[in-house]
Image: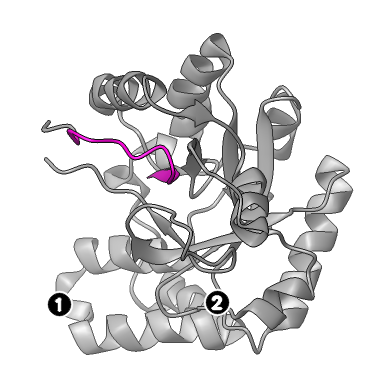
Amino acid sequence: MKWLQLFNKSNSIILEFDHLTQNDLESFEEQITEVQKYYQFSHLEEIGSRVAGGKRQGLAVITFSNPRKSVLLRALPVLIGKKIPFTLFLRADCIGLNRLPPEEELQFYAQKYPDKFSQQIIDEKNHEFIYDPEAGELFLRSLRNEVGPLPIEIIDPTLFMGTWGKLREIPKDLVEWGINLYVAPSLKKVVENEILFMRHQLSVSPRVAKTTQEAVWDEGSLRRFDLAACVTSKTGAVTQESHWWDLPYWRFST
């Protein structure tokens, strides 16, 4: 790992993690230790607030794209032990059903049954999951009958989501709840339902969000949900020129 030689404390950085295997833990802890030498760990909403107010930065945020079992089992005990705050982005429809995101289920189907899926079909269905998730879900259900069962034998069990009960056990002073905006902005009702369900389960509404590369939301769309910060697929440091609704992720060079 080649660490960045110069950290600019007038900027902030947002670190993104998702699934962590046991072998990933050493690198995860190395990154945290290195970043902590130069930045104060905080929550994403604070970065969004400072960007919106034109204030000095100097913060770092640890985010997890999904509350996977591997995150709860491996990453969070490290952060909780060090009293480092973190942000968890949720997809409520996956948590309650203890399932993978639809696009990941499709990828495992394609891995198990490669002769059944062309890249064109995969691309079309991934687009459908964003713009017409109900149709995408019907397609996945049809695979159960027409292709075969979800090949759970090739899936790491810790890839699946944690339960609401486990999420409620996380220390409230450290966790910041966010929403994973995996659908297009035109499907605001889907997002409203997700937020309502999160509020029911956690007694809190998300104030931050992340989007996929294709489902990018603009400032007005995000304000409707009372969100204070959103990270997209861009990479780099958060600077004075950044916008709270279009924040980049930091990538360490390797």
Describe the element under mark 1 as helix, strand or loop.
helix
Q: Nearer the viewer, residue 56 or 87?
A: 56
Name of the residue lying farthest toward the top: 81
The residue at 19%/36% (across/down) is: 4
Q: Where 146 falls versus 51 (above or below)?
A: below
With 144 as the anchor, is 95 left or right in this view? right
Between residue 64 and residue 144, name the one nearer to us: 64
- Residue 21: quadrant of the picture: top left
Q: Position of residue 71 (x, y in %)?
A: 47, 32
Which amino acid, mark 2? Glu
Q: Which numbered tag is attached to residue 137?
A: 2
- At 26% across and 19% down in the image, what residue appears? 26
Mark number displayed over residue 223 = none
Quadrant where the N terminus sits is top left
- Taking depth in this image into account, of 159 and 183 the one nearest to the observer is 183
Residue 201, placed above or below residue 39: below
As drawn, is 159 to the left or to the right of 194?
A: left
The x, y position of residue 158, in whole percent, is 42, 35
Please report the residue visible at 35 percent of the width from the left and 67 percent of the height from the top: 148
Q: Is residue 66 visible?
A: yes
Please state the extent of the stretch shown in magenta in the rendering: 4-17
Q: Can you say whether 214 is above or below 111 in the image? A: below
Position in image of residue 105 (x %, y %): 40, 62
User: Residue 130's x, y, as percent?
Assistant: 51, 80
Q: Which residue is mark 1?
A: 115
Question: What amino acid does circle 1 point to?
Answer: Asp
